[in-house]
Image: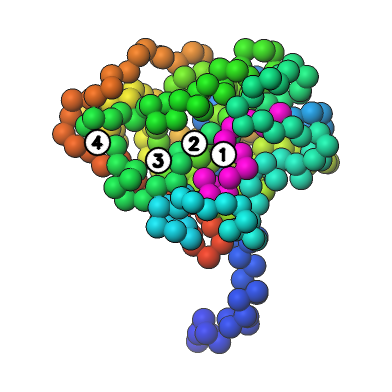
Amino acid sequence: MSTRPSQRAGARDAAAAHPRELAREAVRESLVLLKNERGTLPLARSGRVLVVGRSADSIADQAGGWSLTWQGTGNSNADFPVGDSILAGVRDAVGADNVVWSIDANDVDVKAFKTVIAVIGESPYAEGAGDIRRSDTLEHARRHPEDLAVLDRVSGQGVPVVTVLLSGRPLWVNREIDRSDAFVAAWLPGTEGFGLADVLFRHADGSVVDFRGRLSYSWPRDACQTSVNRGDAEYDPLFAYGYGLTYASPHAAMGVLDESPQPQRCGVQPFVASFANIRWQVGAAGDAGALP
């Protein structure tokens, strides 16, 4: 006869669950690699790294809505005393002296760095505050033009750009992807920013933690593709359900994506696109997760 869970070793010991280690592992397993041109990733743990983007040092952005507050807004890193931002993870990987952080990349000599890591994404939201209705589109730059602006400043200068997107859903980010040599859908990693560094950087001995995440939603090809489901008669996503690159499997170069101007209004019935936030957070597992 099997032992009841309540009678197993460590059942009443919260510390025995190792929540941060498990949350960090969940982050590693859920990351989805959408683009990796010329083997940009994994990165070496050496050389100067420029980190840009308003979300790089924001655990609130990593956590999203329903975290400490209803909308997830108004929180600072100090409100997550046992959490780490993605910036902290990069500093830990290559050494704080080798990392420069600039929110907007203004007045920064990009060519002085070996790599650029841009952390962009959605501001926290819950329920109606995140709805995308018929007056809107799935275009990320409509709500956050500053993210595209920072990529414009760092791309095209001969330094590889690795972009990490924090979001609770797939978004139309063709222009952001085009300005990136590697692009990672990180969803909402919660308190465990170190989980990103675990996968983005090689270990000191040269070994890697490979990407295992696969898309659990189809990724839109255009900003009005609010309905894109497997089995549709005209199923034509940019990245299909289950897509995800790895270090171990070779893949063809992506090429330039369609950056045609997108409509401000899609002309469809009201559509709520605030999908269940995908997050991994100490004490609050996400509502949904990328496939293993």
Q: Quadrant of residue 173?
A: top left
Q: Which residues are magenta?
A: 50-63
The residue labelled by disc 4 is 133
Sequence-wise, the earlier of marks 1 and 4 is: 1
Report x, y in % for residue 118. 61, 30
Q: Measure the alpha-carbon separation of dots 2 and 1.
A: 7 Å
Identified by mark 4, the residue type is Arg
Report x, y in % for residue 176. 50, 23
The answer to whether mark 2 and mark 1 are in CB contact below 8 A is yes
Sequence-wise, the earlier of marks 4 and 2 is: 2
Q: Quadrant of residue 164?
A: top right
Q: Measure the alpha-carbon separation of dots 3 and 4.
A: 15 Å
Q: Measure the alpha-carbon separation of dots 1 and 4.
A: 25 Å
The residue labelled by disc 1 is 55
Q: For mark 3, does the 10 Å Cα neighbourhood hold few (<14), some (14 to 19), or many (20 or more) residues?
A: many
Q: For mark 4, does the 10 Å Cα neighbourhood hold few (<14), some (14 to 19), or many (20 or more) residues?
A: many
The residue labelled by disc 2 is 121
The residue labelled by disc 3 is 169
Residue 13 is inside the magenta segment: no
The answer to whether mark 4 and mark 2 are in CB contact below 8 A is no
Identified by mark 2, the residue type is Gly
* Closer to the eye: label 3 or 2: 2
